[in-house]
Amino acid sequence: MSDPYAPRREDKFSFGLWTVGNRGRDPFGDAVRDPLPPTAAVAMLAEIGAWGVNLHDNDLVPIDAAAAERDRIVKEFAGACERHGIVVPMATVNLFYDPVFRDGAFTANDRRIRAYALQKTMTAMDLGAQLGAKIFVLWGGREGTETDACRRPDEAIKRLREAVDYLCEYSIERDFGFKFALEAKPNEPRGDIYMATTGAYLGFIETLAHPEMVGVNPEVAHEQMAGLNVLHAVAQAWEAGKLFHIDLNDQMPGRYDQDFRFGSANVKSAFWLVKFLEDVGYAGPRHFDAHAYRTEDLEGVKDFARGCMRTYLILRERARRWNADPEIQGLLSEMDGKAGGSEVAIPAPHSSRHREALLATTFDRAGLAKRGMAYEHLDQLTMEVLLGVR
């Protein structure tokens, strides 16, 4: 009998070279796993049923590689992807690891560093386009401060805008067709990062020269680090037409960036997120930006990656069950108050006829205030679906 929770290509599950290749290093301890060469990572992802592999430029090509070495590495990697049927849907650039970016990249005070960051990003875009990527993520991991004495934040925003506008023009000039996805995070590795939440980036995008090319890449853990509801951030991005990519992982509230296996810490939150993505028909990659526990060896890394995909698929099945549950759907149908007697619906757009009818309507305010919503019962039914007893 086939496994109903086995991943398929149409699920569009992807992992980064930096995720399955994470060696378990942390601020208090060195690496516990051997390096995983990019071609071996591709083979492993094919083995476990993934669809795509994503990469920072320096996940694949060392930062100081000569042109001939770069070409050899890219050719070998592209060949491995072709042999194993793995695509590269997204590429990004590492503007946070090298010491040159200790004061940021696009927002650094030194204009030479800002220019170098643009150069490095353009060459990363060249690499991504060569490998077939159509999404380019920008995460400003060092675009922030420990002290606001260093620069005015509005100046940093202007510098960031100039950089994104420049990169959009480069993509247009080279006919790359990239969609840029901006990724927010409240803090770490900087004390504060300028664009702390997805909502901040949604506001920023409308100030750009090419807002149609730029969207967001919400990450579960990053929104949870800020104490926010990731579903709400994703829904706002979707409603605005800006959900270009998504990073799935998990996180305990109030902690450092943990990048746990998807659904491993907050299963109900993960359920609502999966349900939303499936209900609205999100067709983009489902990228797992997470890594295995430091306790694991290579087989444990495979368990981690399989677990991310399997949990998503289980939650998708639970979402379908939730949508088909007659008691749940009956409760939902009662919530909009159609049985309450008012025929004055709220239309769009505004009209003078409706305005006068609305102003003339008498509402039973006291009666409306007494009406129970049955949300406790609805939430319990949700838990029972999740726990497998409905």
Image (cartoon, rainbow, N blue to C red):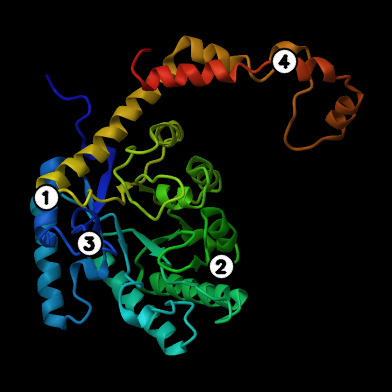
Q: Amino acid at mark 4?
A: Arg
Question: In 3D space, how far apart are the residues under numbered discs 3 and 1 (Cα atoms)?
Answer: 13 Å
Q: Residues within 10 Å of mark 3 (few under 14, many from 20)?
A: few
- Say which residue appears at 26% left-offset and 69% top-offset: 57
Labels 3 and 1: the sequence-earlier one: 3
Question: In 3D space, how far apart are the residues under numbered discs 4 and 1 (Cα atoms)?
Answer: 55 Å
Left or right placement of residue 275 versus residue 357 in this view: left
Q: Amino acid at mark 3?
A: Arg
Labels 2 and 1: the sequence-earlier one: 2
Q: Secondary structure at mark 3?
A: loop
Residue 74 percent coordinates (x, y): 15, 68
- Say which residue appears at 8% left-offset and 52% top-offset: 83
Q: Which residue is mark 4?
A: 371
Q: Which residue is mark 2?
A: 208
Q: Amino acid at mark 1?
A: Asp
Q: Which residue is mark 3?
A: 25
Question: In 3D space, how far apart are the residues under numbered discs 2 and 4 (Cα atoms)?
Answer: 46 Å
Labels 3 and 4: the sequence-earlier one: 3
Q: Which residue is mark 1?
A: 297
